[in-house]
Image (cartoon, grey):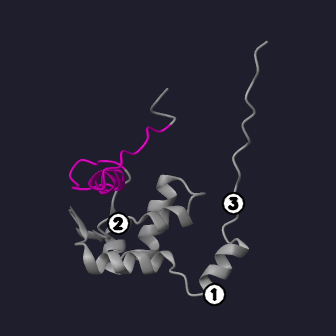
Amino acid sequence: MATTKNTPAPRKRPANTPAKKAAVQSGAKVPEDYLAAIREAVPDFVYPTTFGDVHLPGYMPTGFIIDNANLTEGEIFTKMLTENTDEESLAVVRMLPQQNFEGIDGSLEDLMTQWFGAQGVTMGESAASSD
């Protein structure tokens, strides 16, 4: 007789759990602290575009990923951009097309791919492109 293994359903964690709140109140580092420390020790990743250079932290610390585990790669990247990028870089990103566009050097898709690639991370294929 064959037996089946019961696997529990994945748990969804709330964004602000009591444990996270207690950790912050006790002085634990928050994602912004991780990125500030990285910027002091590791050169920024620089992405040149037609509109100027985009400066991003050299890599995304594991703590930032863990603290945002309920987000997709794209959502984590967007959060990192909006919370940890200088205004000049963010203004350049806002002007970029989402995908390669003739006559413009740089796109949001290419920026994400190169930044994740510089960290040794390969972005997954979208559901639309895998059909």
Mark 2 falls on what kind of element? helix
Numbered mark located on residue 13 in the image: 3
Q: Where residue 27 sits: x, y (%)?
A: 56, 87
| Residue at the spot of label 1 | 25
Count neighbours of disc 2 (C-alpha within 10 A) and say few if under 14, some if 14 to 19, many if 20 or more: many
- The answer to whether residue 86 is seen in the rendering is no
Q: Main secondary structure of the magenta part?
A: loop
| Range drawn in magenta | 99-126
The amino acid on which the numbered mark 3 sits, given as a three-letter code, is Arg
Spatial distance from mark 2 to mark 1, Cα to Cα?
34 Å
Q: Quadrant of residue 14?
A: bottom right
Q: Is residue 111 magenta?
A: yes
Q: Observer-nearest residue: 95 or 84?
A: 84
- Tell me which numbered mark, 1 or 3, is placed earlier along the sequence: 3
> Is 109 placed left or right of 5 in the picture?
left
Spatial distance from mark 1 to mark 3, Cα to Cα?
19 Å
The amino acid on which the numbered mark 2 sits, given as a three-letter code, is Val
Residue at 79% across, 12% down: 1
Q: Is residue 34 magenta?
A: no
